[in-house]
Image (cartoon, rainbow, N blue to C red):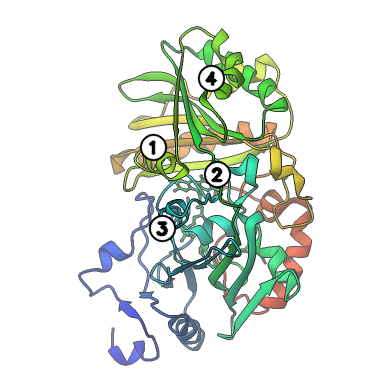
Amino acid sequence: MDSRYLKGLTGEVVTPKDPFYNEARQEWNRAINKFPLVIVYCERKRDVVNAIRWARKRNVSIRIRSGGHHYEGYSTGDCVLVIDISRLNELKLNKKRNLLKMGAGAKNTDVYDLIGSNGYVFPGGTCPTVGVSGFTLGGGWGYSSRLYGLGCDSLLELELVDYKGKLIKANKSRNSDLFWACRGAGGGNFGLVVSMKFQLPKPANSSVTLVSFFYVGTTSEKQAQVMNIWQNWLKELDKRMTLVASFYNAEGEGLGIFARGFFYGSPEKAREILEPFSVVEGFRLELEESSFLEAVKKVEATYPPYEKFKSTGRFVQRSYSLDELETIAELVQNPAEGSDYAAVSFYAMGGEITEVGKRDTAFFYRDARYIMGIQSVWSDDAFAMENREWVRERFAYIKRITEGSFVNFPISHLKNYEREYFGDNAPRLNRVNEKYDPFNVFKFPQGLK
Ligand SMILES: Cc1cc2nc3c(=O)[nH]c(=O)nc-3n(C[C@H](O)[C@H](O)[C@H](O)COP(=O)(O)OP(=O)(O)OC[C@H]3O[C@@H](n4cnc5c(N)ncnc54)[C@H](O)[C@@H]3O)c2cc1C
């Protein structure tokens, strides 16, 4: 590529002839294999502005990348300009007002380190390397969500570079329509968010109980039984507890059930709350009380540096019959060839999430009881197709019994994706998109139209 072609781009510019290109083009999901034209690592907001202007002048499609964890890899693409903001990650904590100002490239782990070591908690995600802006723009579910709400519920303000390269501030009183839209539907759509300001929950001296439970000798029947306990238990659950329960089939281990999450209270109380699960034989419970930061670090340590996977998630609005639960458990009985891990997972919702109205932010499915995820993980590329197909086939059943998809757990096979991700908020989102990105400069396979 002629260097004159790249004139106007600032920051670190990586092209296919660069030795670093092969690493730079990777997403966390290593099953995504795209070849961008140029990747630019922005060091300052000005680099973002220059990148957007450059792409428009050259008629090159833009993809925005923060932490690179999009399930389907929509933060990259073939022959596109990837604007990578991972280096715009400065953090500023205002202890007087309990505020966190963050460069939009910061990752969960960066935020947890700073706020945790200052005695705060943060309603972020579970994986250390997920970008906080990507997470928040899609709503953001985590182990603190039932007590502190979704990630986007703590957002006070953001700065976004629009299609003209102009810096726009959005909060409750300025560009409030954009602010509304960015709390649940902002990822990749209206412009590039370069900073965010969060209101932190007041420093809590209380500790966190890290909850883990599993079953020894699981069978498909037990998986369905535990699912049944889960759906009844969740209705009255203390909002200080947020768990995700996975019903899985792992290579070398077979069927299993594993649940994990936080309880903002004592281990004794957690044990009492989890009592209903002990009626199924083989129940084992582990409770570890520690500071918020220590609990987060233990969770972070369970994540691999990357994976090859296909995964997605849908909102559950109702109770299922035993027959249905057996069918759900049945989904993981025969994993795809080459699968390392196949699972159906339930992410608890409710609590503070429902205290915000369905129309108050772009995150529509506030009243869901939990998110039902499905995933398959593999190592050998030779089995990628089988594993993808495995998820796709089972997704067809899950889609029939659920209502709406979680945009942070997306899937490419959604016909009416605007409606599926944003429900009745979709028409208003289209209007906001038309106002802030009238020429659809920020487009990707499931972008707002
Ligand atoms: C291992 C793993 C664990 C996860 N755990 C959780 C979880 O606990 N809870 C949860 O809610 N989600 C979770 N997710 C999903 C994750 O939150 C979403 O994929 C999120 O969009 C990732 O953000 P990112 O910045 O890392 O990814 P990216 O791929 O960089 O971005 C994701 C999308 O958002 C857009 N985007 C990112 N940053 C900006 C920005 N600053 N301005 C405008 N658009 C932007 C991108 O263009 C892309 O469309 C997990 C994902 C993985 C792979």
> In the rendered image of this protein, does residue 240 appear above or below residue 6?
above
Lower sequence index among marks 3 and 2: 3
Label 1 vs label 2: CA separation? 21 Å
Label 1 vs label 2, nearer the camera: 2
Q: Which residue is tagged 4? A: 330
The amino acid beneath tag 4 is Glu
CB under 8 Å between discs 4 and 2? no
Query: In this view of the protein, which residue sits in the foreground, 139 or 78?
Result: 139
Q: Quadrant of the C terminus?
A: bottom right
Instruction: Choose top left, top right, bottom left or bottom right for residue 189.
Output: bottom right
- Residue drawn at x 54%, y 39% is 206
Q: Residue 142 carries which label?
A: 2
Label 4 Cα crowd, 10 Å radius (few <14 / some 14-19 / many 20+): some
Query: In this view of the protein, which residue sits in the foreground, 231 or 77?
Result: 231
**SS category of the residue bearing label 1:** strand
Lower sequence index among marks 4 and 2: 2
Instruction: Choose top left, top right, bottom left or bottom right for residue 146.
Output: top right
- Residue drawn at x 43%, y 20% is 256
Label 1 Cα crowd, 10 Å radius (few <14 / some 14-19 / many 20+): many
> In the rendered image of this protein, does residue 308 appear above or below residue 11?
above
The answer to whether residue 410 shows anywhere in this view is: no
- Left or right of residue 197: residue 126: left
- Residue drawn at x 65%, y 47% is 149
